[in-house]
Image: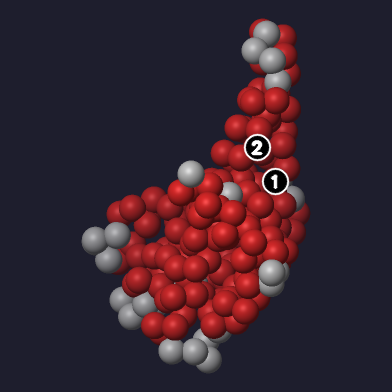
Amino acid sequence: PIAETKNTIQVNFCLLGGVPAVTKFAGNNYPKMIRLEAAKFINLMTCANPLCLHMFIACGGIGVLVTLLEPNYKTYNTLVKATVEGIWTIFHLQVCSITLSLSLSLSLSLSLSIFAHNLTQKLLDFTKADFCHLFAKSGLLPRLASTLISVFKDNESETYLHKLADIFFYFSQAFELAVIDSLCTTSVLQSTS
C-alpha cells in the first residue's frame, strides 16, 4: 500500500504541473546543490512508473537531463552520477515496461509466446530509437562522450562507467540516420580519442 500511495502522489504531482516547476532548477544558473536536488527529483520521476516517465519527457525532461550532465566528473561527481542514473533508467524502465505489459496481456500458449517475443523486440527497437533520437537532437552525445572520458579517468566509478557504456550501446543500436550522424560528429569522436 505504501508504494502505491507513493506512486499515486508522484502521478498527481505530475498531473498538477509539478515537473516544470522543479526541473527549472536544473539550469546552469543555479548553484550545484540546488541542481543536485533537481537531479534527485528527476530520478524519482524516471524510476517511479512509466506514466511519470512519460509526463517527465513530455515536460521537456530530455533537455533537462542534457543540461544536468556535466563533463567534469571530478567537480560534479554526485550530479553526474544522478544524471547518468536518470538517463540509464529512462532506457531501462522503457524496456521493462514494454516487456512486462506485453507478457501480462498475452496468453502463454507457444504460438502467442513467440508472437509476443517478436512484437516485444520490434517495440523495444522502436522506443529505444525514439529516445536515442530525442537525446541526440538535444545534444547529449558530445557531453556524454566527455563524461565517459572523465569517469574513465576516475578509478572509483566502475558502475557508472558501465552505465555510460550501456547508453552508448543503445545509441549504436539505433538505426536512424540522425542518431548515427550525431554519434559520428567530430566533437563526439574527438572526445573519445
Outermost residue to the left:
155
Image quarter where the C terminus lies is bottom left
Query: Which comes before the other along the chain, label 2 or label 1?
Result: 2
Give the secondary structure at mark 2: helix
Is disc 2 in contact with disc 1, using a CB cutoff of under 8 Å? yes
Instruction: Report which quarter residue 138 is drawn in.
Output: bottom right
Foreground residue, 105 or 92?
105
Give the secondary structure at mark 1: helix
Type of amino acid under label 1: Thr
Outermost residue to the top:
110
Mark in the foreground, 2 or 1: 2
Q: Which mark is residue 127?
A: 1
Type of amino acid under label 2: Ile
Q: Which mark is residue 162?
A: none
Label 2 crowd (10 A; few <14 / some 14-19 / many >=20):
some
Task: Find residue 73 and report its horizontal and vertical position in percent.
Answer: 36, 73
Q: Which mark is residue 98?
A: 2
Foreground residue, 27 or 43?
43
Res. 135 visible in picture: no
